[in-house]
Amino acid sequence: MAKTKNLEEAINLWNSTNNTVGFNHGFGSANDQKAVLLETMMGNTAYFYDNDVREQSQVIYDGR
């Protein structure tokens, strides 16, 4: 990832790997001034960009 020039290159690099376990990852690009979060599991990666509609209805609690 450190040698990619933008998010597109980073995502292409990620897609060329063999995901075998579930993790959450995040990476950003200073060139694009954007970031993406990845939720992964074997054989699948879900990509979440800023203001993703899948996250808009989530309730956030502050824990107080």
Image: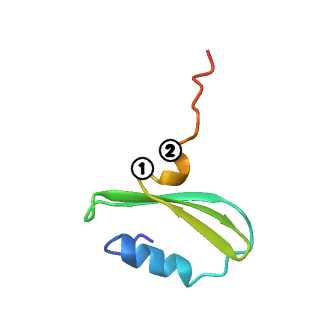
Asked if residue 62 lies left or right of residue 4, the reply is right
Asked if residue 61 lies left or right of residue 3, the reply is right
How packed mark 2 is, by other alpha carbons closer than 10 Å (few <14, some 14-19, many 20 or more), is few
Query: Which residue bears the numbered disc 1?
Result: 51
Q: Which amino acid type is shown beneath numbered disc 2? A: Gln
Farthest bottom residue?
A: 16
Q: Is residue 37 above or below residue 64?
A: below
Q: Which corner quadrant holds the C terminus? A: top right
Across and down, in percent, residue 18 comes to 66, 81
Asked if residue 25 lies left or right of residue 51, the reply is right
Q: Residue at x 60, y 26 (%)?
A: 61
Q: Which corner quadrant holds the N terminus? A: bottom left
**Distance from label 2 to label 1 (Cα)?**
7 Å
Residue 3, can we see it?
no
Across and down, in percent, residue 8 comes to 38, 75
Choose between 23 and 62: the one closer to the eye.
62
N-term-proximal mark, 2 vs 1 = 1
Q: Is residue 35 above or below residue 3?
A: above
